[in-house]
Image (cartoon, grey):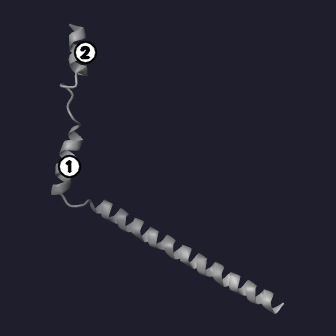
Amino acid sequence: MAAETEDEMNSPHTQMPAQDSIEGSCQNKKRKKDPLVEIVSEMATSLKEYVEMKKSQSLLREAATRRRRRRKEGIS
């Protein structure tokens, strides 16, 4: 009897798909975005823009330093 019950539990026919995956897909279509998700996405975008700006500043600073070195070497 116990062996039959165990076989039924392990059988692929009795296993149900996760409810979250079924309900989640339907809920995503019906509801608006979570405000927290929107805030985090805006913060991520702002952070990405900030990093790009800092990289650009760094590249400009490096280029200016190279120009100064070339001028200094040319004068000396």
Give the residue number, with chain letter if any, for mark 1.
25
Query: Considering only order in the chain, which callout, 1 or 2, is on the residue closer to the N terminus?
Result: 2
Asked if the residues shown at circle 2 and circle 1 are in contact, with their CB atoms under 8 angstroms apart, the answer is no
Residue at the far front: name it.
74
Report the number of numbered marks. 2
Is label 2 in a helix, a strand or a loop?
Answer: helix
Is label 1 in a helix, a strand or a loop?
Answer: helix
Give amino acid for label 2: Glu
Q: State the residue at coordinates (23%, 9%).
A: 2
Relative to 45, say whether 21 is above or below: above
Residue 75 is tagged as: none
Give the image location of residue 44, x and y in percent.
Answer: 41, 65
Give amino acid for label 1: Ser
Real-space CA distance between mark 2 and mark 1, rounded to the nearest whole angstrom: 32 Å
Relative to 49, say whether 25 is above or below: above
Give the image location of residue 68, x and y in percent.
Answer: 72, 86
Give the image location of residue 66, x and y in percent.
Answer: 70, 82
Q: Quadrant of the C terminus?
A: bottom right
Give the residue number, with chain letter if any, for mark 2.
6
Residue count near mark 1 (Cα–Cα under 10 Å), binned few <14, some 14–19, many ≥20: few
